Amino acid sequence: MELEDSLQPIKDIEACIEAVVFAAGYPVAYQKLAEVTGLGAREVKRLAERIAKRYEEDKHGILFLCFKDTCQFCTKEQYGPYVREALSIRRGGNLSGSSMEVLAIVSYNQPVTRAFIDAVRGVDSSYAVNSLIDKELIASVGRLDAPGRPVLYGTTDKFLRVFGLSTLDDLPKTEIQLPEQKPGEQLSIAAEALGGSTEEAAD
């Protein structure tokens, strides 16, 4: 259904989307929003992106994040300490340096195998990879068409939420090309560019 064919004013539909996503408290699929608004998923995503732009431009303490297939409200990073104190939320542990290095490699080069990660870092990265999987910051996205069909890893929607990104295109620009670099200082610079704050987001 095209937007102009809808019986509801656009502002009412946008308000409906905001209400559902706010009440959910977790990423809501555009397809689900399409079912309740009577629009197509593509039209819903277009409206969601308009909502996101409005929240980004206005003075709000929250953001409306749009991902590939879902959208979600979240608080702005600078207000995190106030939210944690007011709601007595336990402060999350910081990601270790090794985890940040692995996250930088995956985010800037995905999809990648664990062998690729190990080669770039020069050490075994199985613990850091498993830790990031447990934290749902990276996940299996398929298998490489090569002998043994090793698992390919990529970042998740939670990774985007934790670092306040809408898409991977919003990653901080860095001139570092990780595959051509040696482990050490270069990876630390990439990890710093990626994270700034490495605190885990509270669910």
Image (spheres, grey):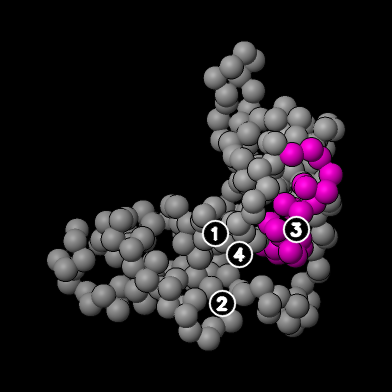
> Residue at label 1?
170
Task: Give the mark nearer the N terminus: 3 vs 4.
Answer: 4
For marks 3 and 1, give the CA distance: 15 Å
Q: Amino acid at mark 1?
A: Asp
**Is disc 3 in contact with disc 1, using a CB cutoff of under 8 Å?**
no
Q: Residues within 10 Å of mark 1 (few under 14, many from 20)?
A: few
Label 1, secondary structure: give it: helix
Residue pictured at 66% horizontal, 73% vertical: 77
Q: Name the residue furthest top.
A: 147
Task: Give the mark nearer the N terminus: 3 vs 1.
Answer: 1
Foreground residue, 73 or 188?
A: 188
Q: Is residue 162 magenta?
A: no
For marks 2 and 4, give the CA distance: 11 Å
Q: Name the residue furthest left.
A: 5
The answer to whether residue 111 is seen in the rendering is: yes
> Residue at label 3?
192
Image spot of residue 7 (x, y percent): 17, 72
> Residue at label 4?
164
Q: Which residues are magenta?
A: 181-203
> Residue at label 2?
62
Residue 193 in the image: above or below residue 134: below
Q: Amino acid at mark 3?
A: Glu
Task: Give the mark nearer the N terminus: 2 vs 3.
Answer: 2
Task: Give the mark nearer the N terminus: 1 vs 4.
Answer: 4
Image spot of residue 65 (x, y percent): 50, 65
Q: Residues within 10 Å of mark 3 (few under 14, many from 20)?
A: some
Label 2, secondary structure: give it: strand
